[in-house]
Image (cartoon, rainbow, N blue to C red):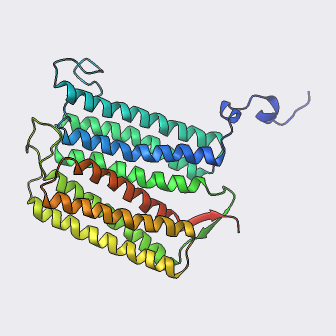
């Protein structure tokens, strides 16, 4: 009886079903960009839930109402149920997008770093669904709502890095896009943004838009909102200063055109975001400004991730 080594699955035709699909980099980036937009977009729909007082339109989780996955007539105002249930359905779409991107990275046999980033996106969506359910059961306590928002911003930041990494060759050499001091400055800018986002949730927690008409100021953060807004603004100025310093240095060292393009867009979006914040402070937080401010938070976070990703670039040398 003769012995033989195992035959490669590709030679027997018994290859994995994933191997039957071939996805080019352009398609991969397209779906990763959709996922990135969706990660930011669901925070906008979540803010609409909050400013319309629809947070408890669905009083249970994962059901909308006790014993029913979908809204029940008369269980709560119809518009509130529709808005909250619609936000939950968008979470399902987001989960599907995350699964598609993950499977696409596996099918394309991308390097481990990319597969892990894609996996984190899907895992994050699942964790966010759980946190959202907990916040409903806690009747939208300010800190529960904050914990629901902040992971989304982290997923946006990582999603932007994923989008950048997909365009890099898997067998390329890792190179430094920035000199060492500028890499530290990029990290400092990202940390400052994290503090801005955290203090921003505290301003929201002390504000008037609790998320449900019946909750009012119950469970809100008991601090002076004007003082909290000033603290938030000071960290925003720090973040803007660090980012402007980073961009000026990138211009000086003649960084790549891609890094500079993302950097200029980032500064522009920070300025617009600051303007919206000033409007909120001076005009008592008009409802329309909340979704705009949240949307711009996602945009700023995404561009921060894209700029940060330029510090380490895989390419052929």
**Residue 255 in view:** yes
Picture coordinates of residue 21 (x, y %)?
68, 35
Q: Residue 63: name its quadrant.
A: top left
The residue lying toward the viewer, choosing from 29 and 178, is 29
Q: Quadrant of the C terminus?
A: bottom right
In the rendered picture of this protein, how many numbered marks are placed on residues? 0
Looking at the rendered image, the quarter that the N terminus falls into is top right
Horizontal arrangement in the rendering, residue 5 relative to residue 238 (left or right): right
Picture coordinates of residue 269 (x, y %)? 36, 62
Q: Residue at x 53, y 52 (%)?
A: 163
Residue at the spot 66% in from the left edge and 57% down from the top edge:
169
Q: Quadrant of residue 184?
A: bottom left
Along the line of sight, which residue is nearer the eye, 71 or 4? Answer: 71
* Residue 58 visible from this viewpoint: no
Q: Residue 57 appears at what percent x and percent y?
A: 20, 29
- Look at 50% across and 70% down and name the residue there: 260
Q: Is residue 154 left or right of residue 81?
A: right
Locate residue 57 relative to residue 2 in the image: left or right.
Answer: left
Q: Observer-nearest residue: 288 or 202?
A: 288
The quadrant in which residue 304 appears is bottom left
Residue 5 position within the rendered picture, expressed as x and y whole percent measured from the top left: 83, 37
Image point 32% across, 61% down: which residue?
194
Residue at the limit of the structure toward the right, as seen here:
1
């Amino acid at each position: 009886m003769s012995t033989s080594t195992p035959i490669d699955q590709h030679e027997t035709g018994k290859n994995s079903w994933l191997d039957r699909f071939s996805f080019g980099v352009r398609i991969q980036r397209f779906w990763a960009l959709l996922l990135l937009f969706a990660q930011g977009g669901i925070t906008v729909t979540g803010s609409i839930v909050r400013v319309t007082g629809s947070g408890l339109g669905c009083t249970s989780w994962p059901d909308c109402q006790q014993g029913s996955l979908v809204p029940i007539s008369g269980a709560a105002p119809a518009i509130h149920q529709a808005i909250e249930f619609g936000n939950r359905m968008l979470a399902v779409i987001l989960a599907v997008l995350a699964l598609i991107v993950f499977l696409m990275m596996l099918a394309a046999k991308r390097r481990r770093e990319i597969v892990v980033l894609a996996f984190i996106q899907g895992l994050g969506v699942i964790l966010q669904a759980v946190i959202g359910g907990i916040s409903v059961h806690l009747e939208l306590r300010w800190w529960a709502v904050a914990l629901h928002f902040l992971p989304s911003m982290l997923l946006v930041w990582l999603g932007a890095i994923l989008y950048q990494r997909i365009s890099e060759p898997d067998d390329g050499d890792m190179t430094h896009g920035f000199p060492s001091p500028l890499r530290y400055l990029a990290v400092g800018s990202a940390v400052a943004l994290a503090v801005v986002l955290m203090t921003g949730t505290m301003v929201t927690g002390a504000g008037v838009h609790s998320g449900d008409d019946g909750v009012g100021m119950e469970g809100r953060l008991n601090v002076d909102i004007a003082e909290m807004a000033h603290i938030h603004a000071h960290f925003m100025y720090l973040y803007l200063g660090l980012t402007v310093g980073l961009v000026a240095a990138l211009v000086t060292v003649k960084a790549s055109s891609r890094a500079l393009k993302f950097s200029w867009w980032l500064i522009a979006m920070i300025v617009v975001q600051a303007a919206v914040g000033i409007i909120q402070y001076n005009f008592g937080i008009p409802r329309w400004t909340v979704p705009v401010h949240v949307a711009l938070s996602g945009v700023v976070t995404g561009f921060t991730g894209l700029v940060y990703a330029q510090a380490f670039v895989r390419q052929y040398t």
